[in-house]
């Protein structure tokens, strides 16, 4: 690691991830446009790097906002308020640190598990606030592959194998069979899971795999030509289980069934709902045809065509669109319909024999309801956040249509 002109800080987290409190001297204090920065002679605060977020904590009582490594390989601590120079008491936000240790060690184990169980390499890693992801070098993956890798990873956790971090010389590297290569020059820090995985890594890790506390795969998706796997470890896995159990229990109570019966009951409800929607759609079409004829018959005629204008109060929007189509199918007609629900809704339709620019008309009217819309040549729709101006929008549409026809 080069450090031209920079201050080298001893990285205590390299040697002891469990260090919670330490003393350090300030080598440089500075105020910037975004706050206060400090460089220490030694630090246990991990800077954002390699997919792992930075630590939080306190320096002389001042809360840490960010820790990062600059272009000169200096570790910069951004703090909430200024501190006096000299020896300083520093303390780590341990809950955050240990959570990151669980996730990062879990990632090493899971990545090796995917390699051994599925012959899939990890090519990306990111640790978020709620979950961690790895990117695998494949465009798709099966459920059975996910389960095999997850089972193997948790077997390693249950066996409580040792996890050791150490620096090795460049001469040792070729014989280590590292899971991934490194372009760093000089001594390389590696993290080794006993008889399972060896990887270059500068992050913080647990001492025993049992401390990872379980690895749970939550989701996966294709991203470009890779597969992104989302997972949680330790406390996050417990919290995830609690949330899922609460959701499942809530659903089960709604249906008055046991937890084990919930999936089948939900499937049954989905099928019943699908049938009801199909039946409702048929009835809505029939009703729209009847009302469409009535609206058309009562509408005034202007120079060979009719205009139907109506404002509904909290009607189903899909039905309003069906009705608009039914109205204009009766004969030469333009339908301008509004619906006042939680927002303002507009539907404009015209018979195929008419040639008005409904998109342009809708755009003008949507300005009144503070919204936007679009659609096809003969049917457009829009929405906005101001239902109080719906009637004005309909009146404007009617006046524009009449002015063009004169």
Image (cartoon, rainbow, N blue to C red):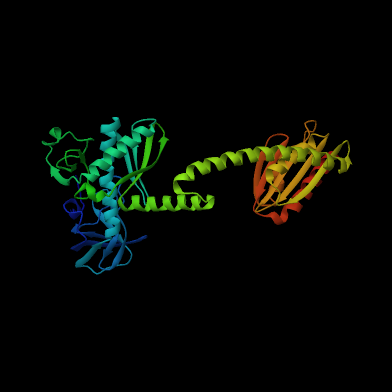
Instruction: Quadrant for the C terminus, please.
Output: top right
Placement of 255 over or under 281, stated as above or below: below
Image coordinates for residue 280, horizontal then vertical, percent: 69, 40
Front position in the image: 325 or 35 = 325
The quarter holding residue 106 reads top left
Residue 69 appearing in the image: no
Tell whether 203 sits left or right of 223.
left
Rendered residue at 88%/35% (across/down): 304
Instruction: Please tell me in which quadrant of the rendered image residue 125 appears.
Output: top left
Q: Is residue 73 left or right of residue 398?
A: left
Comparing 255 with 114, the one in front is 255
Question: Residue 109: percent from the left, percent from the top?
Answer: 25, 41
- Looking at the image, which residue is at 53% across and 49% down? 255
Q: Position of residue 276 (x, y in %)?
A: 64, 40
Foreground of the two, 143 or 13: 143
Question: On the picture, is 26 further left or further right than 131?
Answer: left
* Quarter residue 36 falls in: bottom left
For image coordinates 36% across by 33% down, the residue present is: 144
The number of numbered badges drawn on the structure is: 0
Location of residue 287 in the rendering, given as x and y in whole percent from the top left corner: 77, 41
Quadrant of the image for the N terminus?
top left
Q: Is residue 169 visible?
A: yes
Of 94 and 396, which appears nearest the observer?
Answer: 94
- Residue at image point 35% right, 36% down: 146
């Amino acid at each position: 690691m080069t450090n031209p002109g920079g201050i080298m800080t001893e990285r205590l987290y390299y040697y002891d991830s469990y260090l919670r409190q330490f003393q350090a001297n300030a080598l440089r204090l500075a105020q910037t446009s975004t706050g206060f920065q400090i460089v220490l002679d030694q630090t246990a605060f991990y800077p954002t790097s390699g997919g792992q977020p930075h630590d939080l904590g306190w320096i002389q009582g001042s809360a840490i906002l960010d820790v990062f490594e600059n272009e000169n390989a200096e570790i910069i601590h951004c703090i909430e308020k200024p501190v006096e120079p000299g020896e300083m008491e520093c303390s780590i936000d341990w809950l955050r640190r240990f959570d990151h240790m669980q996730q990062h060690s879990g990632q090493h184990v899971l990545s090796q598990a995917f390699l051994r169980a599925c012959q899939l390499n990890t090519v990306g890693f990111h640790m978020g606030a709620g979950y961690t992801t790895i990117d695998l070098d494949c465009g798709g993956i099966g459920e059975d592959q996910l389960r095999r890798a997850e089972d193997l990873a948790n077997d390693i956790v249950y066996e409580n194998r040792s996890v050791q971090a150490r620096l090795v010389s460049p001469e040792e590297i070729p014989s280590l069979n590292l899971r991934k290569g490194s372009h760093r020059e000089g001594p390389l820090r590696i993290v080794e899971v006993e008889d399972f995985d060896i990887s270059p890594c500068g992050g913080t890790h647990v001492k025993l795999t049992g401390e990872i506390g379980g690895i749970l795969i939550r989701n996966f998706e294709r991203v470009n030509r890779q597969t992104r796997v989302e997972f949680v470890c330790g406390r996050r896995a417990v919290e995830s289980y609690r949330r899922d159990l609460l959701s499942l229990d809530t659903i089960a109570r709604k249906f008055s069934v046991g937890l084990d019966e919930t999936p089948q009951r939900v499937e049954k409800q989905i099928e019943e709902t699908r049938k009801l929607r199909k039946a409702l759609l048929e009835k809505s079409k029939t009703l729209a045809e009847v009302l469409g004829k009535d609206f058309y018959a009562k509408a005034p005629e202007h120079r060979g065509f009719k205009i139907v204008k109506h404002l509904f109060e909290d009607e189903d929007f899909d039905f309003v669109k069906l009705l608009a189509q039914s109205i204009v199918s009766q004969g030469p007609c333009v339908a301008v319909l509004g619906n006042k629900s939680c927002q303002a809704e507009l539907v404009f339709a015209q018979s195929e024999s008419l040639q008005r620019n409904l998109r342009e008309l809708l755009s003008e009217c949507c300005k009144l309801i503070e919204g936007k819309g679009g659609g096809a040549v003969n049917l457009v729709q829009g929405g906005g956040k101001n239902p109080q101006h719906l009637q004005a929008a309909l009146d404007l549409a009617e006046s524009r249509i009449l002015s063009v026809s004169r």
